[in-house]
Image (tube, coloured by chain):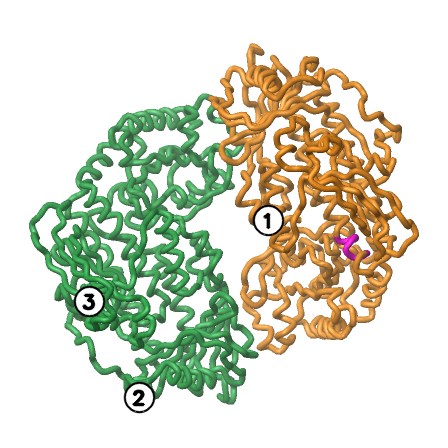
Chain colours: A green, B orange
């Protein structure tokens, strides 16, 4: 996802690369902990990058701001919404039917205020904090405003448990439901600070650490006695003291002190899901506004970004008049079931954490390994009317509804290596990826040429709605243009199968004698598969006309 | 080399990545050319980066200036030397015994002058070009001033042919010895502009192209009629016309026109070597000042950088009083034989080019493939008193005198992947790389601990003359610190064998039961191998004391 919006390299350069996971459980006399198992912390074995990237939310936000700024977009802050209404529910898509009143706050007052981010709305009531009041007319509103989403509340969308029961916002936490977290630079003789550590201490319960850039770590820990942090009046300094006292005992017999605590917080591990993700096809919610869960699976930002990534291209299509409102409905159809899966995973982790088992860390590690196709996003499969369930057998490895997989291919012109994923960029166009097979076979070559010519002369390719790409399966040394098999302009757009000829076709289970073509959405998910036969192209044009 | 001075990543980002090589020979009716063979253009199969990087010399110079600037070093230009003398030949190393008079030129006059770089000295005679005259007292002088080196001439060092015969600077070129070259953005239907192309045209002889960043290429071509370019009075515009007329015929039946010619030149493919590389142990020459050859093997900058890389750390050792003048003598002992090998390769290429063969490109491609260990620098082996020829059998894959090979290893603390080459940085210290073997075997573990302890308590390690590194061979999941095998501080400095346990030891042919330790020079060449036994460490201390 990040690569497709041009931010992957910056994130890789800025973040800590997390490769290793270690579990610690009670030592023999239960006076402290000992390492029990270690393994690779990888998102999924089929992932392009075989590690996790960890960086501060503020750095991710900075990089996003910089990236937007390069495209001339400035994010205004601090701005809080005050009210909104839909003026004309039945108005056409391109009409500005939502009116939002926003208050621009004075940055200096926000900085000096002790209010948490989630209570920032309250500042709007203090006259000296106000810079200006602005009324905005919008076509759409997207509320990415967190677990206590104001947008969600304005729309009257309830938060439910998985049984569908509405849950009050301020229910009382159960024992062990409260966790603390803090960022610090450790002074320690703990052996594996650069790994993700899952620790079950016989003294304080579960503690986990995740390394961050600059030799820093984040420590998460279960609070057995949460009365102190739950009275609501504890200061950040007091909270840090409480957390550090608990956490440091959790590392015994190793010492653990903090040189520089930059952040600490406490949170409840609970699960909620919004009853709907949109309102009147004009207002959408995304991220924590849709789904509340613990950070135990490391899915907060990852999963929320995927919400926005699913929604943004659909909004763009609607705004440019290339699709109707029905496309917007697929946002909820696709993302809500995934959110339920995520919440179920979070509940499974929580059941494990609260179980009487003495080997929670090892079981947690196995659970993460089993679920990594889902948590990495690679295995997320969308089942909506945007997925056409035909011809899957032509390319079993290109799973309809899933993202295009990573596989190494060679650019035909330069032989530089790239990933199949590099054929996707998060722009407006759908991509028609043609796997013609071995085009040095006369019949295959002929079908491919006819298919390409028919594509090239279509209005959909002509006006840029669809971009073409071809992945050939020919041996490294074949000089195709010279052999007259296909024209050079076609080859310039082509990539070849990976380092070993035929390996990609084999892994995608595409026949080199008959091939397959896949229509891929702007977000990289496989929408439609057809045979490489020009008469079948009608399916593609029909699909696009009915978006 | 570039990675070890912190410039590798920038060069990779800036340069074109060259992966592909294609040969073209006469087509059937000899009216033009056709592609005959293609292959990977890789420096050597054991290289860390399996492609060549191509970028403009001006960009390389800019990146070097930026890199120096980050360390507070500014390169002054335009400055030309006027005279120099050695005041006290027998003075101690740290005395400023060389006096050099330099003229700072006014940049605006240099820009408007039509003089080539090599004739810039002449500007010093024109009063209005002079900014200031400066007298510098130096400990050493290094002349990296090209094929017509002024420094070399001042020292009276002759340029010889390989037979040792002195060759006059201005001998007349033989037929076919003159080549033209130009940089341009091609307008072409030539099929493989992003490959390195070796073309034998039946119409104009040999033509070669190398892609450059920004969809540009450099074309080299043999000039059959060199009278026009050899009268010495041809302007750059005239030369470009002459070259383009020849080159474009060479691509027939493909069209080849130039959109933007930024540089063109002509040169003689001839071979010379300096009779000595230094003068009075105070003045050194490097690069083209030492060896003149054609660009046909692509070795100009590559080989010259390796000269400087070999010399610089030795000068630093001498300047800091950590070695005597004998260390400086090894510069010539090591680099002159390599220069001869290079010149022999260049002559072999030239013999091939002038041969009556009709398949010169294919033979050229084979020759480059055979020679790629040498041309990539990976196979360059230094045979001087700095290479101690004992114990090679303990680690046959760490060839004494050669650079440390690339191999993937894991950092023990974070499991992040890196190269064995990353253990080298071009700083002052030698590195003692310890391959203890499988330290979970009690005897191996005991030897390793004793060896490490003896190292750590030595003055050489204490004062930073030697840095320690350990490459372990234990399976991925072993938690060594927890198992008490070695102390955590040792492990923090350790790397593990590659992705597959034992693969590195196998490829280096080091026994996991007895191990080996290698002393590596600041420039990454393997100097000395010893068993992992503390009594053998005396060999290391002796080596360093006799530098």
Up the image or down, A501 lies above or below B113; here it is below
Of tags 1 and 2, the one toward the viewer is 1
From this viewpoint, is residue A175 visible? Answer: no
Q: Nearer the viewer, residue B499 or B308?
A: B308
* Label 3 to label 2: alpha-carbon separation: 28 Å
What range of the chain is rendered magenta?
B313-318
Q: Is residue A245 left or right of residue A126?
A: right
Q: Quadrant of residue B279?
A: top right
Tag 1's secondary structure?
Answer: helix
Residue of label 1: B66
Q: Nearer the viewer, residue A434 or B275?
A: B275
Q: Residues within 10 Å of mark 2 (few under 14, many from 20)?
A: few
Same-subunit check for callouts 1 and 2: no
Residue of label 3: A150
Q: Residues within 10 Å of mark 1 (few under 14, many from 20)?
A: some
Q: Mark 3 or mark 2: name the one nearer the start of the chain.
A: 3
């Amino acid at each position: 996802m990040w690569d497709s919006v041009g931010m992957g390299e910056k994130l890789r350069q800025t973040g800590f690369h997390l490769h290793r996971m270690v579990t610690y459980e009670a030592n023999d006399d239960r006076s402290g902990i000992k390492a029990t198992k270690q393994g690779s912390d990888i998102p999924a074995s089929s992932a392009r990058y075989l590690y996790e990237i960890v960086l501060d939310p503020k750095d991710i936000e900075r990089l996003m701001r910089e990236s937007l700024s390069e495209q001339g977009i400035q994010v205004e802050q601090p701005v809080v919404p005050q009210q909104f209404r839909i003026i004309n529910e039945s108005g056409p898509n391109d009409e500005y039917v939502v009116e939002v009143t926003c208050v621009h706050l004075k940055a200096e007052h926000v900085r000096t205020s002790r209010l948490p981010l989630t209570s920032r709305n309250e500042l709007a009531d203090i006259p000296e904090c106000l810079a200006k009041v602005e009324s905005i007319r919008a076509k759409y509103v997207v509320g990415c405003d967190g677990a206590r989403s104001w947008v969600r509340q304005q729309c009257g969308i309830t938060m439910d448990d998985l049984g569908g029961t509405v849950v009050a916002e301020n229910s009382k936490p159960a024992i062990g439901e409260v966790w603390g977290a803090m960022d610090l630079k450790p002074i320690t003789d703990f052996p594996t600070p650069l790994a993700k550590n899952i620790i079950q201490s016989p003294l304080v319960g579960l503690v986990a650490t995740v390394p961050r850039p600059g030799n820093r770590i984040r420590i998460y820990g279960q609070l057995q006695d949460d009365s102190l942090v739950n009275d609501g009046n504890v200061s950040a300094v007091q909270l840090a003291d409480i957390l550090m006292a608990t956490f440091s005992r959790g590392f015994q017999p190793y010492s653990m002190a903090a040189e520089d605590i930059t952040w600490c917080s406490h949170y409840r591990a609970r699960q909620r899901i919004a009853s709907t993700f949109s309102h009147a096809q004009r207002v959408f919610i995304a991220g924590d506004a849709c789904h509340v869960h613990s950070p135990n699976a490391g899915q907060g930002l990852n999963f929320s970004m995927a919400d926005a990534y699913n929604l943004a291209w659909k909004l763009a299509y609607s705004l440019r008049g290339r699709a109707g409102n029905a496309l917007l409905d697929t946002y909820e159809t696709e993302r809500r079931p995934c959110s339920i899966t995520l919440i179920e995973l979070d509940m499974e982790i929580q059941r494990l954490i609260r179980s009487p088992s003495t080997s929670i860390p090892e079981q947690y590690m196995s659970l993460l390994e089993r679920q990594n196709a889902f948590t990495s996003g690679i295995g997320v499969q969308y089942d909506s009317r945007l997925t056409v369930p035909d011809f899957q057998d032509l390319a079993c490895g290109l799973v309809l509804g899933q993202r295009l997989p990573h596989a190494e291919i060679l650019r035909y012109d330069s032989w530089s290596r790239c990933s199949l994923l590099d054929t996707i960029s998060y722009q407006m166009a759908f991509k028609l990826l043609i796997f013609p097979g071995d085009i040095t076979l006369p019949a295959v070559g002929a079908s491919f040429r006819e298919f390409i010519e028919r594509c090239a002369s279509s209005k959909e390719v002509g006006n840029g709605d669809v971009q073409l790409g071809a992945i050939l399966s020919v041996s490294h040394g074949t000089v195709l243009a010279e052999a007259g098999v296909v024209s050079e302009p076609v080859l310039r757009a082509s990539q070849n199968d990976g380092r070993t000829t035929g390996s990609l076709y084999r892994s995608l289970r595409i026949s080199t004698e008959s091939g397959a073509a896949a229509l891929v959405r702007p977000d990289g998910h496989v929408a439609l598969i057809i045979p490489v036969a020009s008469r079948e192209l009608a399916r593609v044009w029909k699909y696009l006309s009915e978006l």
